[in-house]
Image: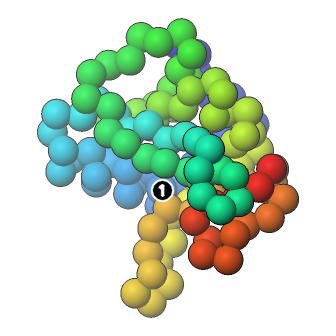
Amino acid sequence: MDKFSPQELKFSEKAILHFASSLKSNAKSDGVRIGVRKAGCSGFEYFFEFVETKSDDANDFIFNEGECKIYVDKESLNYLKGSLVDYSEDGLNQGIKFHNPNAKAVCGCGESFTI
């Protein structure tokens, strides 16, 4: 398992606080996995899931911030390099936002992107 280089993927303080809060409400989880998979009308989408057991997978990178562990597999990291993961609140809309310099276009629904 490798450590993230801050130059590859960055997390805002708000995103870390959001992930840490989510982990507290799911006591069985060791961390959160974020990634990219083929889906949606534009080709790719971001996903999040809880990691219930510690991952020793050599294909995983891990970002440690206090009690918060964020796992990303190497393939997803290729699509996320240079990105900022942020948490924003805009009226009734709130959630994790990816500021990904690799995304060439985002679909109309905002759920998927093209690289």
Which residue carries the number 1 mark? 15
User: Residue 73 location in percent, x, y?
Assistant: 56, 27
Residue at 39%, 55% in the rendered image: 17
Total marks in image: 1
| Callout 1: SS | helix
Residue at 76%, 44% in the rendered image: 82
Quarter assignment of residue 75: top right
User: Residue 34 location in percent, x, y?
Assistant: 50, 41
User: Residue 55 location in percent, x, y?
Assistant: 38, 17
Say what amino acid the circle numbered 1 marks.
Ala
Instruction: Give the side of residue 112 with respect to residue 100, left or right.
Output: left
Question: Is 69 located above or below residue 23 in the figure?
Answer: above
Of the pair 4 and 42, the residue shown nearer to us: 42
Question: Is 111 located above or below residue 47 in the figure?
Answer: below
Instruction: Give the side of residue 109 with respect to residue 90, left or right.
Output: right
Question: Is 26 located above or below residue 99 in the figure?
Answer: above
Of the pair 103 and 81, the residue shown nearer to us: 103
The color scheme shown is: rainbow
Residue at 40%, 87% in the rendered image: 92
As drawn, the residue found furthest toward the front would be 41
User: Residue 87 location in percent, x, y?
Assistant: 50, 64
Quarter assignment of residue 40: bottom right
Question: Is 65 located above or below residue 108 in the figure?
Answer: above
| Residue 68 seen in the figure | no
Local packing at callout 1 (Cα closer than 10 Å; few below 14, some 14-19, many 20+) is some
| Residue 27 seen in the figure | yes
Residue at 72%, 40% in the rendered image: 79
